[in-house]
Amino acid sequence: MVAAVAAVAVFAAVALALAVTTHEAIESTHGEIVRARAKAAADAGFSIALNGLLLRDEASLAALDGRTREIELGGANIRIRLIDERGKVPVNQLDGPTVERLLHLAGVDGAALDVARDSLLDWLDADDDPRPNGAEAPDYETQGITPRNGSLASVDELARVRGFSPQLVARLRPILSVDPDAAPFDPSHADPTAIEVMSESGADSPSVIERERELSGQAVALTFTDPRTVLHRPITIAVDADEPDGGHAHSEATVELSGDSTQPYQIHGIGRAEK
């Protein structure tokens, strides 16, 4: 009898283990399906946005004013943003006063501003002579960091510069560009904060006031209805997709339209995140 009871207990334990394993497999499969649906929705949103640019669709071009365009597709909520890279602050090309405005608008002042400003300028210049509040190679030795003495390769690299915390970099990220071939700053579709940074007049700049009016709906934002103005212009397509059952995916890349029918566009820096 004892042996029979023991056998039943063993069989019950095995059955329970199989049930748990089966449940986990089902959950895992369900999770993969949810992620796949979200990724497909994000990719579809990216394709819709790119096609809209190629066709110069009004709904797509209107998104160049910085607002989010929302669409529903197969039950998924898709949010599309088209970001004009020429409307971002070209951080590799900044001088001292412009860096000061950038930091001040990000909430940095006083001695902390002086350190971050001079350290960034030292990181970007080719010499090894530190500015009064700056930093060169000896100041980074204990951290195992070697200053680039040249242009930043990414916005993330900014967090390695003395005076720039990850939190500060996160606040600055939406308005910064490190494009080595950046064209002159164009305020037409820029964030008002980026315009403040790039204008000596700051918040009083007519361009800032006009963009704020556009974004508040008091004025019509300029769109790229002329096909010549959208060609060879770096535009980032950022897409977030949410599935009803909780799946989320992000797709982002910068595109440039060529006007060449054989290769109408190029895509750079494709990135995705899913959960």
Image: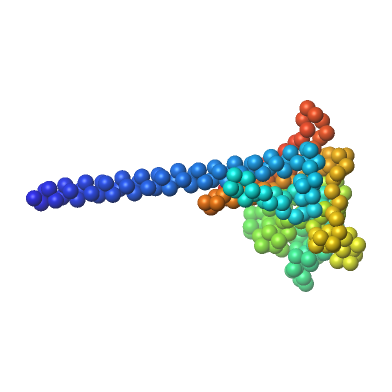
Q: Please report the residue visible at 20 percent of the width from the left and 48 percent of the height from the top.
A: 10
Q: Quick one: 45 or 162, which is closer to the camera?
A: 45
Q: How is the image coloured?
A: rainbow
Look at the picture and state if 196 lies above or below 157.
below
Judge by depth and name the residue closer to the eye, 163 or 46: 46
Q: From this view, report whether residue 102 is shown above or below residue 244.
A: below
Q: Picture coordinates of residue 243 (x, y %)?
A: 57, 49
Residue 266, x across and y down, in percent: 75, 36
Residue farthest to the left, as pictured: 1
Residue at figure coordinates x 86%, y 66% from the top left: 203
Residue at the (90%, 63%) spot, across then down: 205
Rendering coords of residue 38 (x, y %): 57, 46
Tell which of 38 and 70 is nearer to you: 70
Residue 234: percent from the left, percent from the top?
A: 79, 44
Give the left or right position of residue 12, taking residue 230 as reference: left
Task: Name the image quarter holding residue 119.
Answer: bottom right
* Number of on-image labels: 0
Q: Is residue 73 visible?
A: yes
Left or right position of 167 against 65: left
Quarter location, residue 196:
bottom right
Q: Judge by depth and name the residue closer to the eye, 159 or 162.
A: 159
